[in-house]
Amino acid sequence: MNELLHLEEFWNKLYQDLQNRNAIIKRWFDVRKVTPDIFLKGDLVLKWNVDRSKVGKHKKFESLWSGPYLITGHTRKNAFKIAKLNGWKLPILVNGKHLKYYKPMHAGE
């Protein structure tokens, strides 16, 4: 009977250790969780080129981003309307995870 009590205590301690470990891992992931960029109307962005990202569709040093594009609006939390700089609007909405800010390079850099 004594061994059963020790075994139950052992399992309870293991269960508590597992709960503590899971809580630590959850906190770590919550801290590292990426918050989406907030794009505003008028921002210049680059769009991820899905077709070019496939194997064999691009050369080694070709950019996988196309653009720059201009944010013309948004409809939902992370869906954006974009247009080329010449004014041509893309007919589809683009998810914000496929966009990044455009940072033009200056001649002095």
Image (cartoon, helix red, strand yellow):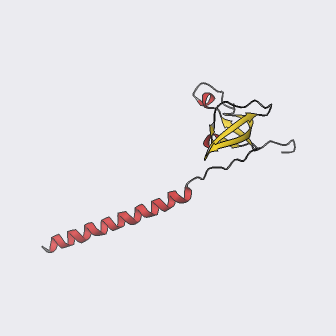
Residue most extreme to the front: 75
Name the residue: 56% across, 56% down. Answer: 32
Residue 4 location, x and y as percent?
A: 16, 70
Name the residue: 72% across, 41% down. Answer: 71
**Dividing the picture into quarters, in which one does residue 68 lie?**
top right
Residue most extreme to the left: 1
Viewed as shown, does residue 67 lie left or right of 93?
right
Residue 80 location, x and y as percent?
A: 66, 41
Viewed as shown, does residue 10 lie left or right of 60?
left
Residue most extreme to the bottom: 2
Quarter of the image with the C terminus is top right
Name the residue: 24% across, 71% down. Answer: 9
Residue 89 location, x and y as percent?
A: 72, 31
**Dividing the picture into quarters, in which one does residue 2 lie?**
bottom left
Name the residue: 87% across, 41% down. Answer: 107
Viewed as shown, does residue 36 lie left or right of 27?
right
Question: 101 or 79: which is nearer to us?
Answer: 79
Residue 65 location, x and y as percent?
A: 68, 35
Quarter of the image with the N terminus is bottom left
